[in-house]
Structure formats: C-alpha cells, structure tokens
Amino acid sequence: QVQLVESGGGLAQPGGSLKLSCAASGFAFSEYPMKWYRQVPGKEREAVAHITPDAYATAYADSVKGRFTVSRDNVKNIVYLQMDNLKPDDTAMYYCNAHYLHLDYWGQGTQVTVSS
C-alpha cells in the first residue's frame, strides 16, 4: 500500500531554516510527480511546491518562491523541502502528496512552527 512519512519539522526562528523529508513506499516513486502542501487550522490546505518525476521541473507558491526548494532522490524514494528564510506565516502542518492511480495519498504531516 502507498505510504508517505514526513519528518523534519520543528521550531525555527524567523530567518532560520528547516529541511523536511517525505519517505515514500508502495508505488513506483520515480514515475510520479510529488507535491508539498501546508495547512493551518481553519484554512484550506495550500499547495507549496511541486516536482516532476525526473526532477527536471519544479513549481512553487508565490508565498514561498525564492525561499523554499523542493528536490527528490529517486533511489531512496524521498522528496525533500528545504525551507530557508522562514517567516512566522510559514507556521503550519506540512504534508507531502502523491497522486497515484487517480487517488490522492497523504502522509501524517510534520509540524513547522516559526517563532522567536
């Protein structure tokens, strides 16, 4: 079965950095695009970053462009989200997403809190 497990969240100061990881299993990871989303209580889940299967192309929400970098390791089946110059507005639960066989799969999420 498809499994996504996020890690790497935590508390960071404004201007700091965190690197999230999402370990994937149960599907042909290297053949599918991957996405990162985030959500704060009471708001809709927001797409943050997208990466193509071969990592040739990436895309970002305007709010994180220039600060976040998505990457992937198709040998280890892991997708990463490097987050730099963090802002308090980046505080959220972060989820990775795989769209596989017409279904969306999500991990359990990892909490990122940006505060001084």
Image (cartoon, helix red, strand yellow):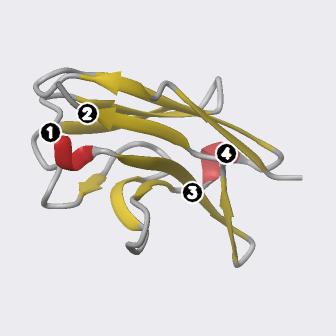
Whichever of callouts 3 and 2 sits on the residue coming sooner in the sequence is: 3
Q: Where is residue 106 in the image (x, y as percent from the top left)?
A: 65, 57
Q: In this view, does 39 lie above or below 55?
A: below
Tag nearer the camera, 1 or 4: 1
Q: In this view, does 94 lie to the left or right of 89?
A: right
The tag on residue 87 is 1
Q: Which residue is at the front of the view, 26 or 10?
A: 10
User: On the image, numbered disc 4 is attached to which residue?
Assistant: 29
Q: Distance between the residues labelled 2 and 4?
A: 30 Å
**How dense is the environment of label 4, judged by Cα within 10 Å: few (below 14), some, or many (20 and up)?**
many
Q: Is residue 101 above or below residue 105?
A: below
Q: Position of residue 103 (x, y in %)?
A: 71, 74
Tag nearer the camera, 4 or 3: 3
Q: Is mark 1 on a helix, strand or loop?
A: loop
Task: Look at label 3 and name its amino acid.
Answer: Asn
Task: Look at label 1 and name its amino acid.
Answer: Lys
The tag on residue 23 is none
Q: Where is residue 1 in the image (x, y as percent from the top left)?
A: 89, 52
Q: What element carries label 3?
A: strand
The quarter holding residue 112 reads: top left
Task: Look at label 4 and name its amino acid.
Answer: Phe
User: On the image, numbered disc 3 is attached to which residue?
Assistant: 97
Q: Is mark 4 on a helix, strand or loop?
A: helix
Are dots 1 and 2 in contact, CB under 8 Å? yes
User: On the image, numbered disc 2 is attached to which residue?
Assistant: 114
Whichever of callouts 1 and 3 sits on the residue coming sooner in the sequence is: 1
**How dense is the environment of label 3, judged by Cα within 10 Å: few (below 14), some, or many (20 and up)?**
many
Q: How far apart are marks 4 and 3 (CA)?
A: 11 Å
Q: Position of residue 58 (x, y in %)?
A: 30, 51
The quarter holding residue 67 reads: top left
Whichever of callouts 1 and 4 sits on the residue coming sooner in the sequence is: 4
Q: Residue lying farthest right?
A: 1
